[in-house]
Amino acid sequence: MRRILVGIVLMLILSTIMSMCISNDSSDTLTTIQQSTTSASHQQTNTSTSQIDTTKLHFYMFGQAACPHCRDMKELLPKIFGEDKFTYYELQGNEHNSQLFSELYNILGVTGVPVIGIFYDNHIVAIVEGGIPDPAKNVPRIVSVALEEGGVVFISDKTYVIPSNQTEIIKKLENIFTSGEASEG
């Protein structure tokens, strides 16, 4: 039953993330997100989002300067969680970062940007391909689900959990997200 509830919460978050990436009208999307996440909040189980210490978060993001969703996330995440909690890796014109992104493609099949690695207490807990609507509300929810599931939540066109016993893959992902060349823009 717990897995079903967690799946429902993840699907609600996923559907709102994907609709934001496709939608041209972000105000309609934000309204939908608020309605969806409000109904989902009653389905939380053991780890409450209020127990998530946001000072333990760090975001590593692969993106491109020309991408509007990348610009949004590049502005919102540091504003909400702190400048020192965000590392940006520009892909355009940076061979090293492009190679790391290629490794993400080989492991996860990601093709779009932004791709955001969410770390909690220095360990990767989630990877999101696309923007995160209402990050102040949804990031703690994503982290909470990841901690409950005991693995890495991967949100793309579908939602997956990489089990914690897949240590080799998780270590590769942590290495990819922490070894890029940080960019200003």
Image (cartoon, grey):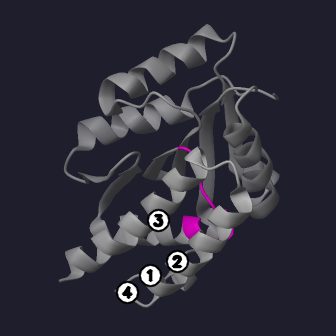
- Secondary structure beneath label 4: loop
Quarter where residue 151 is shown: bottom left
Badge 1 is on which residue?
Answer: 40
Identify the residue shown where x is 82% and y is 29%.
Answer: 184
Badge 2 is on which residue?
Answer: 37
Badge 3 is on which residue?
Answer: 13
- Secondary structure beneath label 1: helix
Q: Tell me whether the residue at label 2 lies in contact with that at label 1, contact meaning CB atoms closer than 8 angstroms.
A: yes
Disc 1 residue type (three-letter): Ala
Identify the residue shown where x is 59% and y is 55%.
Answer: 132
- Secondary structure beneath label 2: helix
Q: Is residue 181 above or below residue 29?
A: above
Please identify the quadrant where the C terminus is shown: top right
Q: CA distance from mark 2 to mark 1?
A: 5 Å
The image shows residue 142 at horizontal and vertical percentages of: 47, 65
Span shown in magenta: 130-139
Residue furthest to the bottom: 42
Q: Is residue 182 left or right of residue 127?
A: right
Q: Which of disc 4 and disc 3 is earlier in sequence? A: 3
Q: Tell me whether the residue at label 1 lies in contact with that at label 3, contact meaning CB atoms closer than 8 angstroms.
A: yes
